[in-house]
Image: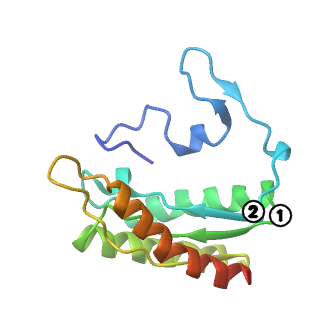
Amino acid sequence: MRSWNERTDEFNLDRLYELAIADPARPESWDQRRYAPDLIVSAIGTNDFNPGIPERATYVGKYVALVRTLLHDHPQARIVLTEGAILDGAKKAALRAYIDETVRQVGDPRVSSVASRHYPGDVLDAHPTREQHAAMAADLVPQLRAVMGW
């Protein structure tokens, strides 16, 4: 919906999804029929919530539209929504609630959500470290296996 700095005029996900190359000067389209995933994991929201908690109805409405597009473009796929690892506190709680509302509004058994723990990065960078990425995978893989029956 917006970038980390509240910009809405950049290549945000609604535009990026359609592109193979996101060069504003020469964007290259991507044909979604060229790839048929079994599982799509969406861990979006960090940038949207960075400047503050966005208005619920607008955010959920855009997320519902994205998930419905994913379902249309990839009817064989299961879709799992999660909040990612960077947010914490009130922002994380709000995003979790928005994700739950998105799943409810979409109302499709192929769509579910899993929880993600907070990984704060380090003193130099708020993004998760290499070790924290490994821990994130260890957290998510069992949940995704359960969803997929793997």
- Picture quadrant of residue 18: top right
Please identify the residue farthest to the left as the structure is shown: 123
Name which residue lies at 71% across and 57% down.
70
Would residue 119 be seen by someone viewing this image from the given angle? yes
User: Marks 2 and 1, how far apart in space?
Assistant: 5 Å
Would residue 55 be seen by someone viewing this image from the given angle? no
**Residue 52: where, in percent of width, then height?**
25, 57
Q: What residue type is labelled 2?
A: Leu
As drawn, is 101 to the left or to the right of 120?
right
Residue at disc 2, secondary structure: helix
Label 1 Cα crowd, 10 Å radius (few <14 / some 14-19 / many 20+): some
Please identify the residue farthest to the top as the structure is shown: 25
**Residue 131: where, in percent of width, then height?**
35, 61
Residue 94 in the image: above or below residue 71: below
As drawn, is 123 to the left or to the right of 33?
left
Decide which of 116, 121 is in the foreground and name it. Answer: 121
Q: Mark 1 points at which residue?
A: 75
**Residue 14: where, in percent of width, then height?**
57, 44
What colouring method underlies this structural image?
rainbow
Name which residue lies at 43% across and 64% down.
134
Residue at disc 1, secondary structure: loop
As drawn, is 98 to the left or to the right of 63?
left
Q: What residue type is labelled 1?
A: Pro
Residue 57 in the image: above or below residue 97: above
Residue 27 in the image: above or below residue 57: above
Q: Name the residue under label 2.
A: 71
* Residue contact at pointers 2 and 1, CB within 8 angstroms: yes
Decide which of 18, 64 is in the foreground and name it. Answer: 18
